[in-house]
């Protein structure tokens, strides 16, 4: 019995679906683990997090996993979040086969930061994400009408060339807004430039089986990866500590970003005051408050992040941010959105220096 026949029999018998459902059931063990936060809110968000990661996995492995006909989709947004996502970002990615060539094209727009990465994405196996090639928009030749064209391949091709490695399996596009209301996002598309086929092959039993298996592996391994990562922040509660930059890059961080990560925990009568006395020349910086599961808090309804252009500056050019449960009557208030604990992230983006960021816990009443 060959692979297709075996997969067909497993689909007919229901084994493929049963294993998929059992994998989903086991994924819930993470929310009940001893190290997981067990407040009603944190536990409820933990299960919601699993449903979000399931949707991300299904979109990636079932709906958009054909490297011959790649589509740049948005895997992280207002209702799918993971790994200290940045609310200022528009994330896109597409699957590729490194043995082929791809054309990435579109319009530059007016967005401040635009980066293209060729990556080895091993989230589904718990191995993180490694960058093989990278292009910053500053390195790209843009046509007078604002259009751009990039070729991605293992062999050099043209001025706007994105290097692929022998194991590269995805293209990531990261756009960073300074002010979404005032900037025009880049419109970016991808196609296989050496593909003579008219359209993809029909769904096969083998493909469906592997897609469902990949979805469960992604759900289990990626949530565990970020859970263990957040656990390492325990030593720096309420501090804005430099992260392990090598590890950040190993899980898909942008080469132009220097990251700070830690945990936060505040009682009802406390506030976290964060001060950046030294702001270096940079494309931007930003601060984001997250929940226990490393999801950014709901920025649709709460101010949970600030950046270089949205923050209020002190007369001496420094920045003071106040994380509190209620408004301290300060322009840089970060709302905890009913949370009492979580994780946080500070980013220096496109900066040559990465000065420290100070923090301290004060009684809320003392702020007045």
Image: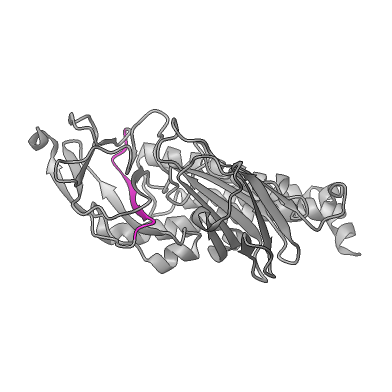
The coloring applied to the image is one colour
Q: Is residue 210 above or below residue 184?
A: below
Is residue 118 in view? Answer: yes
Instruction: Report x, y in % for residue 214.
Output: 67, 55
At horizontal 77% and vertical 55% (from top left) the residue drawn is 193
Residue plotted at (46% across, 52% down):
83
Mainly helix, strand or loop, the magenta region? strand
Q: Position of residue 332 (x, y in %)?
A: 24, 36
| Chain part drawn in magenta | 338-351
| Residue in the image at 57% along x and 65% along y | 133
For residue 123, above or below residue 183: below
Q: Nearer the viewer, residue 212 or 299?
A: 299
- Magenta span includes 125: no
Residue in the foreground of this view, choosing between 129 and 106? 106
Instruction: Please say if 36 is above or below 337.
Output: below
Number of marks in the rendered image: 0
**Image position of 16 (left or right of 115):** right
């Amino acid at each position: 019995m060959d692979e297709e026949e075996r997969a067909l029999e497993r689909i007919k018998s229901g084994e493929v679906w049963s294993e998929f459902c059992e994998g989903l059931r086991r994924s819930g063990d993470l929310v009940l683990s001893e190290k997981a936060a067990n407040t009603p809110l944190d536990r409820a968000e933990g299960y919601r997090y699993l449903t979000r990661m399931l949707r991300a996995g299904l979109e990636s492995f079932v709906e958009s996993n054909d490297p011959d006909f790649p589509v740049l989709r948005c895997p992280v947004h207002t209702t799918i979040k993971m790994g200290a996502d940045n609310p200022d970002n528009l994330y896109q990615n597409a699957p590729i086969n490194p043995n082929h060539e791809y054309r990435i094209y579109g319009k530059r727009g007016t967005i401040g930061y635009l980066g293209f990465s060729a990556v080895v994405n091993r989230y589904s196996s718990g191995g993180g994400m490694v960058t093989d090639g990278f292009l910053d928009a500053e390195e790209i030749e843009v046509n007078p009408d604002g259009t751009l064209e990039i070729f991605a391949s293992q062999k050099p091709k043209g001025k706007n060339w994105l290097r692929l490695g022998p194991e590269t399996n995805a293209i990531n596009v990261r756009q960073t807004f300074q002010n979404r209301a005032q900037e025009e996002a880049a419109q970016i598309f991808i196609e296989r430039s050496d593909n003579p086929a008219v359209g993809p092959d029909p769904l096969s039993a083998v493909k469906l089986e592997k897609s469902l298996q990949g979805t469960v592996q992604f759900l289990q391994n990626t949530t565990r990866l970020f859970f263990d990562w957040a656990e390492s922040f325990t030593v720096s509660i309420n501090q804005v500590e430099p992260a392990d930059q090598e590890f950040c890059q190993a899980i898909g961080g942008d080469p132009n970003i220097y990251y700070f990560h830690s945990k936060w925990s505040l009682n009802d009568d406390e506030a976290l005051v964060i001060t950046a006395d030294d702001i270096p020349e940079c494309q931007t910086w930003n601060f984001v408050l997250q929940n226990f599961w490393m999801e950014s808090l709901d920025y649709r309804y709460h101010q949970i992040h600030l950046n270089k252009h949205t923050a209020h500056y002190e007369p001496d050019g420094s920045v003071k941010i106040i994380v509190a449960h209620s408004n301290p009557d300060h322009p840089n208030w970060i709302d905890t959105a009913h949370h009492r604990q979580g994780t946080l992230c500070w980013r220096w983006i496109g900066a040559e220096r990465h000065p420290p960021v100070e923090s301290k816990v004060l009684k809320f009443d003392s702020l007045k």
